[in-house]
Image (spheres, rainbow, N blue to C red):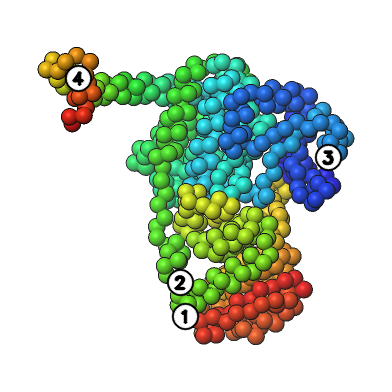
Amino acid sequence: MSETVPVILAYIDPGSASFVILSVLGFMAAVGYVVRGWLSQLKQSIFRRRPVASASKKRKARPAGRAGRAGRAGR
Amino acid sequence: MLNADGGSFKDPAGRVYRVADATGEGRILRGLNGDAAATLEKLLAEPFFRSLAAAGDVAATTLLDDQDSAARSVLAEGWAAVAEHQAVDFLTWPYEWPFSMLQDAALLQLRLLETSVRHGWILKDATPFNIQWPGARPVFIDVPSFVPWAEGEYWQGYRQFCATFLTPLLLAAHLGIPFQPLLRSRLEGIPPEEAVKYFYGLRRFKRGVLSHVWFPAKAERRAQRRAGRGRPAQENARRRQPTTMLLALLDSLKRLITGLSYGPAGSDWARYAETHSYPPEDFARKQDFVERHTAARRPGLTWDLGANTGAFSRIAAQHSRLVVAVDGDQDAVERLYREARDGGPENIIPLVIDLSNLSPGQGWAGGERAAFDRRAKPDLALCLALVHHLRVSANIPLPLFIGWLRSLDAAVIIEFVGRDDEMFQALLENKRENYADYTAENFASELGRHFAVRDQLTLKGGARELFMLEPA
């Protein structure tokens, strides 16, 4: 019996498990990709919110249409 | 003269031939069967492929007219069509590359794969032997590896990619184990069940190991246990996987490999440029000697044997079409590659090879991956401050080394480090043997048997001698 085992193994394609491996790793990578995308969007929205908020405050105090440019020039 | 390439027999769809044209320059032709020719014609019309070839990422390729005389000789071998590829002056194998060369080759493979998938194609395999170095930049040469990809088809080259690219890089980056000796003995790479044994205990938690080494090893082991009860590989090939999952996996592999690093440990060799034993004026005279003779000869291919961090490879590169810089020290070669890649000169290929144990012929009948000294003859060989190491550290007698140099049939610039030189004395410190045969007289006599001395320069007050030689 022990002599037949290596013979059987030699006929098994080691790549036969590849589909399962790729399905699991692909799924994990896709989840990671989506999570990273969310995190990146979250960071961007936080980063954007601050200047937008400050600009809107200044906009109230300045004439419309020139607020943005004037605000940046003043920094 | 038509020579079938010893390493191109595995793909039944084609065969590579080397043909010398009228000027003696080598042309790389590929005979293709009908299906492969039709696929290649379609590929060559794809804008994404043209962009890759224009950027130098893929070897420039054209389908030849049947009237081309070289093409006719390939067609006579029974092929349906003939393609011509951009020629590479000197082939190198992954077990000769330093860490960053394998890393850059892996990133090129992933980039090409991602671009292909986005355009309805895929690379059917993933081996670093499909990547070559015209200089300090990789190019993908196995164009028939591009095949049409059906939406959702899974990536069959993943296992090969891990065995030949990723695992060797993980071993070097995480454990400091050089991958070259492993890849030299296993041309198909390091399989997961073997790799997992290096990453025992807490080592398995190092970045990328659980996913791409430990888990595949377990899954393959389970498949083997279920022998005969699992799905056959051909059935697996028909299974589908969402494209997003494949692209996400490629992206994660790219980030993993980019994040791996191998830091030269600061060996004496890697710091050679700062630590060599030459007084500045003698070092300048040595540089001038090398520059003068390489400039006068303008060699096509120069070998710098014992190149270290490439101080003289750079000089030779100014006057040579290509310099192959060889040294056994990983750190020195790694440093040379990074410098050549990032700041030039680009016509240097740095290789990690122990000169007392050159890469032998490998693969089927020893002809699949040619031995280092059987690939292409150099026009010029530099052997600067090398002979004393081969004699004392590697115990290679002078007649053997000089005889081998003569077999190259090339001009040679060689340096003899005398017995009084402090570097020779340092080598002797831990040796019982005195190497009495290592004398200037014996060296000159051995040179005289094989070469004609065209020029000579004495340095360091007579402790060292430079020779410009031509085959006698």
What secondary structure is found at the residue carrying circle 2? Answer: loop
Q: Which mark is residue A67?
A: 4
Name the residue at 20% across, 24% down: A70
How far apart are the two marked residues, 3 and 4, measured between alpha carbons? 72 Å
The CA span between labels 4 and 2 is 65 Å
Q: Evaluate whether residue B95 shows in this view.
A: no
Q: Which amino acid does label 1 sit on?
A: Glu
Q: Residue at x 55, y 35 (%)?
A: B109
In the image, residue B399 sits, relative to residue B125, either above or below, namely below
Q: Is residue A35 left or right of residue B28?
A: left
Residue tagged 3: B70
- Taking depth in this image into account, of B363 and B377 the one nearest to the observer is B377
Badge 1: residue crowd in 10 Å (few <14, some 14–19, many ≥20): few
B468 over B200 or under it: above or below: below
| Amino acid type, callout 2 | His
Labels 2 and 1: the sequence-earlier one: 2
For residue A45, side relative to residue B243 (left or right)? left
Whether callout 4 and callout 1 share a subunit is answered no
Labels 2, 3: one chain: yes
Residues marked 3 and 4 touching at CB (< 8 Å): no
Q: Tell me: residue A71, above or below residue B196.
A: above
Chain identifier of the residue bearing label 2 in the image = B
Q: What residue type is labelled 3?
A: Ala
SS at mark 1 in the image = helix
Given contact means CB atoms under 8 Å apart, are the residues at marks 4 and 1 in contact?
no
Instruction: Please tell me if label 2 and label 1 are on a single chain.
Output: yes
Q: How far apart are marks 3 and 1 (CA)?
A: 56 Å
Secondary structure under the numbered disc 3 in the rendered image: helix
Q: Which mark is residue B276?
A: 2
Read off the residue under disc 1: B422
